[in-house]
Image: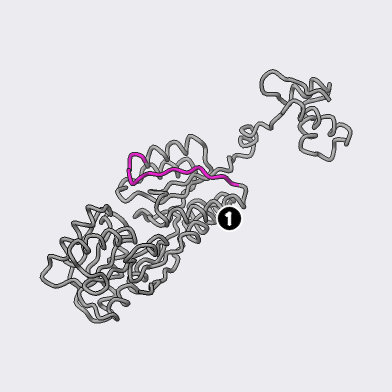
Amino acid sequence: MRKVVSSGQPTIKEIAKRLNISVSTVSRALHDHHSIGLRTKTRVKQLAAELNYERNQTAIYFQQGKTFTIGILLPELSEAFFASAISGIEDSAYSNNYTVLLGQSHDDEAREKQIIQSMKQHRVDGCIVSIGKNTSNYEHFEMLQQARIPVVFFDRIPDLPNMHSVSCNLESGTVQAVDFLLKQGHRVIGMINGPETMVASHERAAGYIRALQKHRLKYDPKLIVHADLTASGTDKAMQYLLSLKRKVTAVVTFNDYVAMDAVQYALKQKLEINKDITFVSYANTPVSGYTAFPPAASVEQFPYEHGQAATHMLLSLLNGEHALNDYQRTIMESQLVIHNR
């Protein structure tokens, strides 16, 4: 059959006019409504195919009040933790017929605000967010809440009383890490922590202190140094720790990337890794296993499951299973993974 050429995007009205039937009949036929006979359905669908008719998804979304799109905002997709978390989010979203709109803040608060505004304009149904390390103002997230767009924070969560969140028990993970070092005979253990504004930094410090108290050891605040998580920031932190009168023989680093930078600094100082100084960290990043000196142990945070849990929480809000102001918090357990040396 010769293909019918239509000018512009074909509409239901055009199909109805050509077949001399009502617009409502065409609509019901395209949706396989039981009130429409097989012959009419066949004629409508055949002409629709010839015209390359596509359903107006925007109109459908408007009718349903949903776009079936989830906005995802995270600091750096290049980090293995977030790459794995995104896989968990996407797999859960797609299995529930949602697509994702992804943005990276690169730890820039202004960029974070711009992305959130864009997602609001694109009418996402909800957002899953891991905030930047420098974010201290949360007005852009409050704007989403005012627009009744639910937000679930994961991993890097803000210090807010009322929020939906999925996070890892970093305090217990830190206790495990320090326990491990103490059993190895270390008594002067430093910590390269993240910025003081981050909730995760406070959780790590709390675990560090609790582990020392558990072993009846005195806590020395000089042994915890806050850094900006850059290579240069790690160098400065290492320089400071190694300059202390008490000889630091082990360091707990904020994550595996900081550990790798710290190892490079230690090597430049002619220190022998795992003899003069030992490192433990967080995230259990696969790439660290390909380095010459991976951390002696790393706290596994299960990022894929992290992403899945955040998505399930958001979908429960979108499906009305929980009220938007019925704030849900999920804390996932961490696990120290000891690497063979």
Instruction: Assign a secondary structure to mark 1.
Output: loop
Q: Position of residue 137 (x, y in %)?
A: 32, 45
Among all residues in the image, which is located at the extreme top?
A: 7
Q: Which residues are magenta?
A: 98-111
Among all residues in the image, which is located at the extreme left?
A: 245
Mark 1, other Cα within 10 Å: few <14 / some 14–19 / many ≥20: few
Pick whichever, 300 or 324, lies toward us. 300
The colour scheme applied to this rendered structure is one colour
Q: Position of residue 141 (x, y in %)?
A: 40, 45
**Quarter that holds the N terminus:** top right
Based on the picture, tell me whether residue 101 belongs to the magenta stretch.
yes
Quarter of the rendering containing residue 244? bottom left
Quarter of the rendering containing residue 180? bottom left
Judge whether 189 appears above or below 89 on screen: below
Q: Position of residue 40 (x, y in %)?
A: 86, 31
Based on the picture, tell me whether residue 108 belongs to the magenta stretch.
yes
Residue at left offset 47%, top offset 40%: 147
Residue 145 as seen in the image, left or right of residue 20 = left
Residue at left offset 40%, top offset 61%: 285
Q: How many numbered discs, if any? A: 1
Q: Position of residue 85 (x, y in %)?
A: 47, 55
Residue 141 as seen in the image, left or right of residue 191 = right
Residue 97 as seen in the image, left or right of residue 115 = right
Pick whichever, 50 or 45, lies toward us. 50
**Quarter that holds the C terminus:** bottom left
Mark 1 residue type: Glu
- Residue corresponding to mark 1: 321
Pick whichever, 212 or 263, lies toward us. 263
Residue at left offset 58%, top offset 55%: 321
Quarter of the rendering containing residue 68? top right
